[in-house]
Amino acid sequence: MESKQRIGVLFVCLGNICRSPMAEAVFRHMVAEEGLVDQFLIDSAGTGNWHIGKPPHHGTRGILDQYGISYEGLKARQVAATDFSSFDYIVAMDVQNEKDLRQLAQSTHAQIVKLLDLVPEAVNKEVPDPYYTGKFEEVYELVSRGCAALLERIRQEAQLD
Ligand code: 4NP
């Protein structure tokens, strides 16, 4: 039997406790609903190192609980040099994350994209940081739309079974 490489998707924000773990959990949930779990490698990381080892922020946990989405086992980590060879899509939450990622990436085959650039109707192309705004519901809605658009983009570009 031929074995195909998994498609690697890494979500990145600043702290890896609010936005990117929410995106990871929502994307995992969508991929599971579509029966595509075996075809993906999904993770998240932060450009900063303050929260390494911590679970998602209680605001992120609260909203995911509300929507019945698991965040079991998620723990913050920092972006590593090896991420640029392990993942195919590196998905930034805001323009600063994207800038930092492009600076960290020496050379990479990965596509570095900003999540809301994938959503044509999104007026604001950045996922606002709920660590400062407290608006976790707004972030959930943006992240959900972005993740749906990302899955659609990957469907167009990759050969999913
Ligand atoms: P996140 O939010 O990037 O969405 O995880 C933040 C979490 C923590 C900090 C900043 C942003 N912080 O400065 O500790």
Image: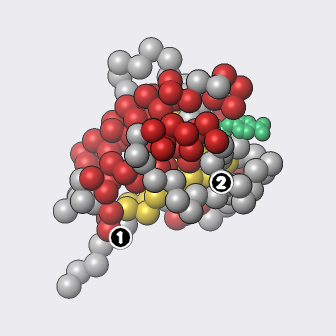
Please tell me which residue lies in front, 104 or 21: 21
Q: Residue 23, relative to residue 110: is it above or below?
A: above
- Would residue 146 appear left or right of 99 to someone viewing this image? left
| Pointer 1 or 2: first along the chain | 1
Question: Label 2 CB, ligand 1: below 8 Å?
Answer: no
Viewer-side label of 1, 2: 2
Q: What's the residue at 59%, 24% (across, down)? A: 135
Q: What's the residue at 64%, 42% (across, down)? A: 58
| Residue 118 seen in the current view | no
For label 2, the residue is 55
* Residue 131 pos. (x, y %): 69, 31
Q: CA distance from mark 1 to mark 2?
A: 29 Å
* Residue 35 pos. (x, y %): 24, 59
Q: What's the residue at 55%, 25% (across, down)? A: 126
Which residue lies most toward the bottom here?
1
The amino acid pointed to by label 2 is Pro
CB of mark 1 within 8 Å of CB of mark 2? no
Indicate the quadrant of ligand 1 in the picture: top right
Which residue lies most toward the right here?
50
The amino acid pointed to by label 1 is Gln
| Disc sitting over residue 5 in the figure | 1
- Would residue 35 appear left or right of 42 to someone viewing this image? left
* Residue 6 pos. (x, y %): 37, 66
- Would residue 56 appear left or right of 31 to someone viewing this image? right
Question: Label 1 CB, ligand 1: below 8 Å?
Answer: no
Which image quarter holds the C terminus? Answer: bottom left
Q: Secondary structure at mark 2?
A: loop
- Would residue 33 appear left or right of 137 to someone viewing this image? left
Q: Secondary structure at mark 1?
A: loop
